Image (cartoon, rainbow, N blue to C red):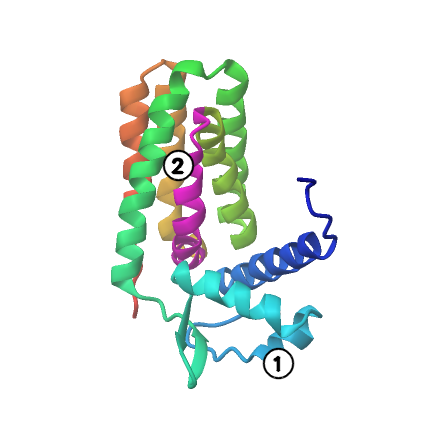
């Protein structure tokens, strides 16, 4: 039978995805603070969309651990939960280890250079207390291996759990404690350049496991 023609479905999908992406970014960067109540009408007015894509986006954010809902009572931004972040950290570390181990054998000098340039930007951003720049440069550094490994399962898991960790990283990158990652990144790049996939993978895992969050 002919494929049904329905122009409305893609638009709804786009609105839902846009709402999800915008709300997730606002939670991660602190625009929407931990335990802040989220009202459908307010979010709808802010994003300029109906309540349907807002509710769909909130359901996805709840599944990702960024939002908590009590039906008939409230929806709020999830508090910073040490246990949830520790769980996400362990999963992300394992995924980055897997990605690096698969990526190193196919890395070229251009990939190594891209990692080092990202780390240089990372170091500069930390010195300037530019948290957004630090997070972006850190993403760029790790994306080299994630993209090269071409493992969609790894990417999917990281998409699920990395936003939880970015909330913790924003606090870490605004202080001196984040600067240890510069040396860790440099060591990963050196090991990758030597073709030491196991060594680079171990260091990538350790890099993610060094994240610490002090609730006080």
Please give left or right for residue 37 compared with residue 84 in the image: right
Queried whether the magenta region covers residue 56, the answer comes back as: no
Q: Residue at x 36, y 13 (%)?
A: 194
In the image shown, does 102 or 216 lie closer to the viewer? Answer: 102
Q: Which residue is mark 2?
A: 154
Q: Position of residue 72 (x, y in %)?
A: 43, 85
Rendered-image quadrant of the N terminus: top right
Outermost residue, front side: 1
Q: Residues within 10 Å of mark 2 (few under 14, many from 20)?
A: some
**Which residue is found at the position 70% from the left and 40% from the top?**
2
Q: CA distance from mark 2 to mark 1?
A: 36 Å
Residue 211 appears in the picture as rendered:
no
Taking depth in this image into account, of 109 and 2 the one nearest to the observer is: 2
Q: Earlier in the sequence, mark 2 or mark 1?
A: 1
Q: Is residue 161 magenta?
A: yes
Asked if marks 2 and 1 touch (Cβ < 8 Å), the reply is no
**Which residue is pictured at 46% across the width and 62% down the height?**
61
User: SS at mark 1?
Assistant: helix
Q: Is residue 75 among what the camera can see?
A: yes
- Residue at 27%, 46% in the rendered image: 90
* Residue 67 badge: none
Where is residue 164? Give x, y as percent.
40, 56
Measured as percent of width and height from the top left, residue 170 is found at 45, 57
User: Magenta region: which residues?
Assistant: 149-171
**Helix or strand or loop: what does disc 2 sit on?**
helix
What residue would you read off at disc 1?
41
207 lies above or below 195: below
């Amino acid at each position: 039978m002919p494929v049904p023609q329905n122009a409305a479905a893609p638009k709804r999908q786009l609105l839902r995805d846009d709402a999800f992406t915008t709300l997730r970014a606002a939670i991660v960067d602190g625009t929407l603070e931990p335990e802040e109540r989220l009202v459908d009408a307010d979010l709808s007015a802010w994003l300029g969309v109906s309540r349907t894509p807002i509710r769909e986006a909130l359901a996805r954010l709840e599944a990702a651990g960024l939002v908590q809902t009590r039906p008939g009572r409230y929806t709020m931004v999830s508090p910073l939960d040490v246990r949830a972040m520790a769980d996400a950290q362990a999963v992300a570390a394992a995924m980055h280890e897997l990605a690096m181990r698969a990526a190193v054998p196919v890395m070229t000098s251009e990939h190594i250079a891209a990692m080092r340039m990202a780390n240089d930007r990372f170091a500069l951003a930390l010195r300037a207390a530019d948290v957004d720049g630090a997070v972006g440069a850190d993403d760029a550094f790790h994306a080299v291996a994630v993209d090269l490994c071409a493992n969609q399962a790894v990417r999917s898991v990281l998409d699920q759990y990395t936003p939880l960790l970015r909330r913790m990283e924003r606090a870490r990158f605004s202080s001196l404690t984040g600067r240890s990652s510069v040396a860790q990144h440099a060591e990963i790049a050196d090991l990758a350049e030597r073709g030491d996939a196991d060594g680079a993978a171990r260091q990538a895992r350790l890099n993610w496991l060094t994240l610490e969050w002090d609730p006080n």
